[in-house]
Image (tube, rainbow, N blue to C red):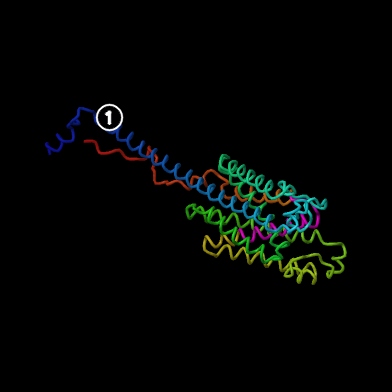
Amino acid sequence: MANTLDRELQPPKDGRSELACKSEGWKDNGESAMNNGSDGRSRRESTVDLIVKRLRSVMVAAILFSMFNTLAGQPASFWLDPERAIRGDGLGLHNSVNHTFEFFLSRGWGPYALSSLIYLALAFVVVSILPSKAALVAGLSCIFGHYYGAGNWLAVRWSLGFTGVGVYAVLLSAAIAWAFFPIPDQMSDRILQRLRWVMMGAMLFDPFVTLLGQPRSYWAHPETVLEGNPFWRWFMVRGWQDYVLMDLLYCLGALWLVSVAPRFYAAVILFTFTFGHFGGGSNWFFYVWRLGMEAPVIYGIVLSSTIVFLSFRRSENLDSMVDHSAVEPSRVPGPVCC
């Protein structure tokens, strides 16, 4: 018994007091926890940077595809006389009916390619230097805008119709799903749950502008419907009630599909529906109401901002990328002294 008490009362061999020893233990563990937290923040920042870099690559691919479509879609006369250039909607470049961004196309393929590459480089730099959220909004906005531009070439110039645009939407959505989801599993699930409502918003906005754009005669004579998609036209000629009912069932089916599909495939489906109905709504702005390319671009910016806001709407969402195994210094037990 006496030997035990002597060992307990024996001062530290290096001459420090027991209090000093415990204090140093708390300090060491606190520094360790702080280092763990710093490592977590670094991992979070690297994850967000990876998302921006991947999305930037998708943006570059979308811009290059638009450039290729624009040049490949020109008539043979363009190469002899650049003033004969056409737009994605099949009209002449200087047609006053609608406005598009021409990038000096009427001056020849050389000035067009050079100005487009300068634009691409500027977009690349802007997305690279902006803060993460702003960079994601800028990158997505470019992708939406160039998706619509390329979709016009596919549907009109190459006569691929809605099928060609739909295939492009699937490919672009797969690329965005790859870009957006190196995120930890639980956070990915929360993001997908929120983005379902962006998809639903785009899907419901499309039929809203479709009904808004119908001629007055449609409400008494549905056979005068104005709708380019054969599938939806079939319902619309039977009356707006049939159209609305089918559209609601269609939206509920898409919502269910995104909710039950595996994560990556759910993201692809979600963005495919979003892109598809973004294009559908934009067609009314561009082809019917003749608001120019600016209207689809603004619509794309609104969707992009909403997607980023809902994906990273709170600081704790980004913090969930951090490894929380680090324990607060005040709760870390000190070592047994001596």
Q: Between residues 334 and 181, which one lies in front from this camera angle?
A: 181
Place of residue 82 in the rendered image (x, y in percent of width and height, measured from the top left): 75, 51
User: Secondary structure beneath disc 1?
Assistant: helix
Instruction: Say how many tags the image has.
Output: 1
Question: Residue farthest to the front?
Answer: 80
Q: Residue 239 occupies which quadrant of the picture?
A: bottom right
114 to 274, vertically: above or below: above
Label 1 crowding class (10 Å Cα cut-off): few <14, some 14-19, many 20+? few
Place of residue 1 in the rendered image (x, y in percent of width and height, measured from the top left): 12, 39
Residue 81 included in the magenta stretch of the image: no
Place of residue 255 in the rendered image (x, y in percent of width and height, measured from the top left): 62, 63
Q: Between residues 86 and 55, which one lies in front from this camera angle?
A: 86
Q: Residue 235 occupies which quadrant of the picture?
A: bottom right
**Magenta: predominant secondary structure element?**
helix
Q: Residue 13 occupies which quadrant of the picture?
A: top left
205 to 298, vertically: above or below: below
Place of residue 71 in the rendered image (x, y in percent of width and height, measured from the top left): 68, 55
Q: Residue at x 49, y 52 (%)?
A: 183
Q: Is residue 201 visible?
A: no
Q: Between residues 106 and 225, which one lies in front from this camera angle?
A: 106
Q: Residue at x 80, y 52 (%)?
A: 98
Left or right placement of residue 192 versus residue 335 in this view: right
Report the amino acid beneath label 1. Answer: Ala
16 to 272, vertically: above or below: above
Quarter of the rendering occupied by the C terminus = top left
Left or right placement of residue 320 versus residue 171 in this view: left
Q: Is residue 338 visible?
A: yes
Q: Which residues are magenta?
A: 271-293
Question: What residue is pinned by disc 1?
Answer: 20
Q: Between residues 260 and 224, which one lies in front from this camera angle?
A: 224
